[in-house]
Amino acid sequence: MRVSLRTVQRDLNSLAQMFPLDFDQSKPQGWCWRQGAGQLEIPGMDVHAALTFTLVERYLQNLLPRTTLNSMAPWFQAAEGVANAQASAVTQWRDKLRVVNHSLNKVPAPIDPSIQATIYNGLLHERQLEVTYRAISSGQDPKTYPIHPLGLVVMEQVVYVVCTVKDYQDARFLALHRIESAELLETQVVRPQAFDIDEFITREFGIRVGDMPLELVLRVRGVLAKFMAERPIAENQSLEHIDGEWSRVCASVRDTIQLRNWLRSLGTEAVVESPPTLRDFIKRECNELVTLYNLPSHPSNSESKQHTAKG
């Protein structure tokens, strides 16, 4: 059946009395869904979808582009309404689920929202960016240079952009909270040949100490041996019981800062037997710690001032 433009306009005027519709004064008249209005769901959102949107909003804030989050706001609002109105075992799942980092929780470094939006736009549209970056290791003034954004990695609550710099082919990563400015350029990203973000993460996010793998031999005791049997540190890990207290773990692993931090965290529950270089490194650190803890504590500034005033 054919209808006239006037009929459509009359119907839209009637619908605008029941739904959040807006129109302009142009001819012919333009219509749109009112900005900020709730999302109309036909059929309505069920509890499973509501739970999914709730978890997306809670845990993916730093991963999704701001434009995506803004466009999903009506669904987030609808999900909250469903969860509040339909108390069920499914919607209660959000109150029963938490994601906990094994490492010490730290206050996340603040990221400038406008810089984050610019970086994400560059990733979405595969365009180069000019950034001003403050490197924490060099201690030098921030430097400005063009980058080719290739991907995002989140590690221990820190968001990194994986990229190449200028015309270099080797990829690197920059922490978003250390980027002091970002400008979207018109030039397209040039991806290095055979770049694989998963291979890059394995290679670079371990913060390597040495290039060669370590043939690690570790003597462990107590429940640690059971944990390592459940979750091996390498595919080729082997574990043998020595006696009623100790077990020996052998594995080929990368020599990384993360490995050494993990070994430190084990305390007296683990002893490095091999390689000798790593064993000697741990021994030197332990000896230095003993020396430091045997030194008298330095007085605080307030204590020093009080002592000076009394003198």
Image (cartoon, helix red, strand yellow):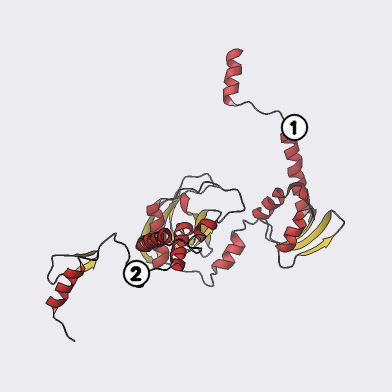
- In the shown orientation, is residue 290 left or right of residue 50? right
| Label 1 Cα neighbours within 10 Å, binned few <14 / some 14-19 / many ≥20 | few
| Tag 1: amino acid | Asn
Numbered badge on residue 41: 2
Residue furthest out toward the top: 311
Q: How many marks?
A: 2
| Tag 2: amino acid | Glu
Question: Separation of disc 1 and disc 2 at Cα?
Answer: 68 Å
* Mark 1 or mark 2, earlier in chain: 2
- In the shown orientation, is residue 27 left or right of residue 305? left
Q: Could you say which is closer to the camera, residue 116 or residue 276?
A: 116
- Residue on which disc 1 sits: 294
Residue 305 vs 256, above or below: the answer is above
Residue 225 vs 190, above or below: the answer is above
Mark yes or no: residue 67 visible.
no
Of badges 1 and 2, nearer the viewer stands: 2
Mark yes or no: residue 158 visible.
yes
| Residue 156: image location, x then y, percent | 56, 54
Q: Residue at x 57, y 67 (%)?
A: 198
For the residue labelled by badge 1, is the local secondary structure a helix, a strand or a loop?
helix
Q: Image quadrant of residue 27?
A: bottom left
Numbered badge on residue 103: none
